Image (cartoon, helix red, strand yellow):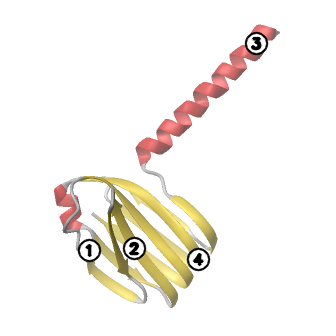
Amino acid sequence: MIGDTNMKKRLFALLGVLLVLTVALTGCTVFSGSAAGRLSITKAASWTITASSVNGHESRKVNMSADNLAALKVVSTNNEGTVSLVITEGDNTRTVDISGQYSGNIDTSGFTAGKINLRLNYEKVKDANIIITW
C-alpha cells in the first residue's frame, strides 16, 4: 500500500513536469483580466484573438528569426476602447496603438532574432478582432 502511494506521487510529479515542459515549448498565451466571448488561437506563425469585450492583457513569447521580425504584421479592429501591442526583447520595448482599425507591418528595428514577447493590453475593448502574423 505504501509503495502504491509513492508510485502515484511520482506519476503525478512526472505529469506535472511534462505539463510545464509542454507549456514552455508551445509558447502558450497567458491572459489576465476579464473577457466575454474571448477566443485566442496560436499557430506556428500567427496569433488570432477575438472577443466581444475584454479588459486586461495577454502575452506570449515567440521565437522569431530575422525574417519573422521583418514580416511582423497586425490587422486589428475594435469598436470601443484601446488596444496596444507591446513588443519586448530584453530591455528593448516598443508599444504600438492598434485601436480602432489598424493594418500594417510593425517597426521591429532594434530587435534581433530570438525570443520576443508579444503583449496585448486591452482597456475597455468591445468587438475585438486581432490577427498578428510573422
Q: Amino acid at mark 3?
A: Asp
Instruction: Locate residue 126: give its quadrant.
Output: bottom right
Q: Is residue 130 above or below residue 63?
A: below
Distance between the alpha carbons at the discs numbered 1 and 4: 23 Å
Image quadrant holding the C terminus, namely bottom left
Question: Circle 3 sits in a helix, a strand or a loop, which is it?
Answer: helix
Question: Circle 1 sits in a helix, a strand or a loop, which is it?
Answer: loop
Q: Which mark is residue 54?
A: 4
Instruction: Locate residue 38: give its quadrant.
Output: bottom right
Q: Which mark is residue 85?
A: 2
Q: Position of residue 35 (x, y in %)?
A: 62, 73
Distance between the alpha carbons at the discs numbered 3 and 1: 55 Å
Say which residue label 1 marks. 106
Q: Amino acid at mark 2?
A: Leu
Distance between the alpha carbons at the discs numbered 1 and 2: 10 Å
Q: Earlier in the sequence, mark 1 or mark 2?
A: 2
Q: Are marks 3 and 1 in contact (CB under 8 Å)?
A: no
Q: Position of residue 75 (x, y in %)?
A: 34, 78
Say which residue label 3 marks. 4
Q: Nearer the viewer, mark 2 or mark 4?
A: 2
Disc 2 crowd, CA 10 A, few/some/many (<14, 14-19, 20+): many
Q: Is residue 110 above or below residue 114?
A: below
